[in-house]
Image (cartoon, rainbow, N blue to C red):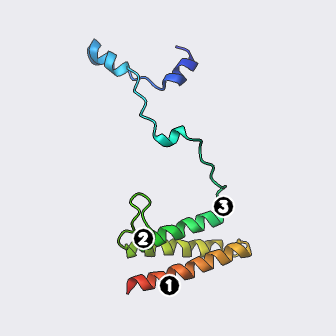
Amino acid sequence: MSEEDRSERGFVVIDKRGSGAEKAAATEEPKAPAAPEQASQAPREYPKPDFAALVVSLGSSALFHLGLVADPTTGEAGPPDLPLARQTIDLVEILQEKTRGNLTPEEEQLLQSLLTDLRMRYVEASK
């Protein structure tokens, strides 16, 4: 079998321990999973990841854990999970500490504004 044939078929498992029927079953090509409807659409283009995207992503996670953002699958906000929200806010604080002096003024402002907002919302949710 040529290298090109192997790459098209994926991998093949041959069990030399069993009977002929078992060997035949083991060498059958696996069926491809059904493609989701989205696969037929044109691929989505995402913006290039940057520091702001990371910070906003962590902020969105914290808001979700505070019960302030709807779950995309259900469309409803879940119950607050304050320990998880606190952990996510702590991660943003660590990011601020570790990047101090290495950010643009805009990045510093974004990080500080986000932390202030998340801390205030955490205190409100904790009442």
Label 2, secondary structure: give it: helix
Query: Mark 2 and mark 1: span between their CA atoms?
Result: 14 Å
Q: Marks 3 and 2: CB-CB under 8 Å?
A: no
Q: Disc 3 marks which amino acid?
A: Asp
Residue of label 1: 120
- Can you give x and y, in whole percent of width and height, for residue 35 in the image? 46, 36
* 41 sits left or right of 72 in the view: right
- Can you give x and y, in whole percent of width and height, for residue 59 in the image? 53, 70
Foreground pick, 3 / 16 = 3
- Sort mark 2 into few (<14), some (14-19) or many (20+) by Cα contacts within 10 Å: many
Which label sits on residue 50? 3
Q: Residue at x 62, y 72 (%)?
A: 98
Q: Residue at x 65, y 71 (%)?
A: 99
Which label sits on residue 65? 2
Foreground pick, 79 / 52 = 79
- Can you give x and y, in whole percent of width and height, for residue 37 in the image? 47, 40
Q: Disc 1 marks which amino acid?
A: Met
Q: Residue at x 49, y 23 (%)?
A: 9
- Can you give x and y, in whole percent of width and height, for residue 90 in the image? 50, 75
Query: Mark 1 and mark 3: span between their CA atoms?
Result: 26 Å
Q: Marks 2 and 1: CB-CB under 8 Å?
A: no
Which mark is first along the chain, 2 or 3? 3
Q: Residue at x 43, y 66 (%)?
A: 70
Label 1, secondary structure: give it: helix
Which mark is first along the chain, 3 or 1? 3
- Sort mark 3 into few (<14), some (14-19) or many (20+) by Cα contacts within 10 Å: few
Q: Is 85 situated above or below 10?
A: below
Label 3, secondary structure: give it: loop
* 12 sits left or right of 7 in the view: left
- Residue situated furthest right in the rendering: 104
